Image: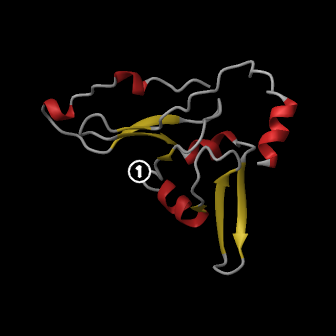
Amino acid sequence: MVSGRRSAARGYTPAVGTQARVPVANECRQCCSFCDRVVNPAGCVAVGCPYLYLYDDDVSKRRYMGCMNKVFSVEIDVELFREAERTRVGYGGVKLAGEPLPQCQVAVDRAYLGDGEAFDCVNPGFFESPAR
């Protein structure tokens, strides 16, 4: 093992000065409600977020938008987004994929509402804003 001899001759690298960051879970499955942290893309448009990008697809002739920081990882069809925003409900939120920025409108969305012990929240800390 030539590579083993080389690393022994060089010695160890210095210890890392800070501890690794623990990723924040963006979903909770501890009860039957199934909660997800979501970001509202309409909020990105409203505040004029500089990380929101648009591109035109030459094949489909459609325009899409996305987040350069991958706060959300999906690319949204702009025409469908605008149609949904004209309704009372609006487009809604998309699942958080990365760390939200200070201007991001983040909320928690419960997939299932129900009664009884199975739907009682056992992780109330999940509803607090993730550390930024």
- Residue 35 position (above or below residue 65): above
Q: Is residue 25 left or right of residue 62?
A: left
- Residue 125 position (above or below residue 110): above
Q: On the image, numbered disc 1 is attached to which residue?
A: 88
Residue that extends furthest to the bottom in the rendered view of this protein: 59
Q: Is residue 73 left or right of residue 7?
A: left
Residue that extends furthest to the left in the rendered view of this protein: 116
For this rendering, which residue is in front, 62 or 36? 36
User: In terms of secondary structure, where does tag 1 sit?
Assistant: loop
Quarter location, residue 57: bottom right
- Residue drawn 60% across and 62% down? 78
Q: Is residue 43 left or right of residue 32?
A: right
How many numbered circles are shown?
Answer: 1
Q: Position of residue 68 (x, y in %)?
A: 71, 49
Q: Position of residue 75 (x, y in %)?
A: 60, 59
For this rendering, which residue is in front, 126 or 76? 126
Quarter location, residue 49: top right
**Label 1 sits on what residue type?**
Arg
Q: Position of residue 67 (x, y in %)?
A: 66, 50
| Colour scheme in use | secondary structure
For this rendering, which residue is in front, 19 or 76? 19
Q: Position of residue 121 (x, y in %)?
A: 27, 27
Q: Residues within 10 Å of mark 1 (few under 14, many from 20)?
A: few
Residue that extends furthest to the top in the rendered view of this protein: 17
Image quadrant occupied by the C terminus: top right
- Residue drawn 86% across and 33% down? 9
Q: Is residue 131 left or right of residue 55?
A: left
- Residue drawn 30% across and 34% down? 30
